[in-house]
Amino acid sequence: MHCVPYYTNDFRLIRVFNDSDCYTYCIFLLIPQITKIK
């Protein structure tokens, strides 16, 4: 399973459900940082 960072115009947190896993994508300064939550 691989994850693709989601970009927003206002750099908010995006929570995505993918393959029964919850991923929180934190976008700061145009640099995607991915944190997996279990």
Image (cartoon, rainbow, N blue to C red):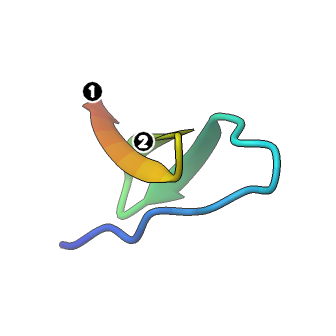
Residue at coordinates 73% horizontally, 56% vertically from top-left? 8
Callout 2 touching callout 1 (CB < 8 Å): yes
Residue at coordinates 32% horizontally, 43% vertically from top-left? 34
Q: How far from the left and from the top, in percent, is residue 14? A: 63, 43
Q: Secondary structure at mark 2?
A: strand
Residue sticking out furthest to the right: 10
| Numbered mark located on residue 11 in the image | none
In this rendering, the count of numbered labels is: 2
Residue position marked by numbered label 1 in the rendering: 38
* Type of amino acid at the residue the image marks with label 2: Cys
Residue at coordinates 52% horizontally, 52% vertically from top-left? 30
Residue position marked by numbered label 2 in the rendering: 22
* Type of amino acid at the residue the image marks with label 1: Lys
In the foreground, 21 or 33: 33
Residue sticking out furthest to the top: 38
In the foreground, 4 or 20: 4
When the figure is inspected, residue 17 is found, relative to residue 13, above or below; the finding is: below
On the picture, is 21 further left or further right than 11?
left
Distance from label 2 to label 1 (Cα)?
Answer: 7 Å
Using the rendered image of the protein, determine whether residue 29 is visible from the camera's viewpoint: yes
Q: How far from the left and from the top, in percent, is residue 13? A: 64, 34
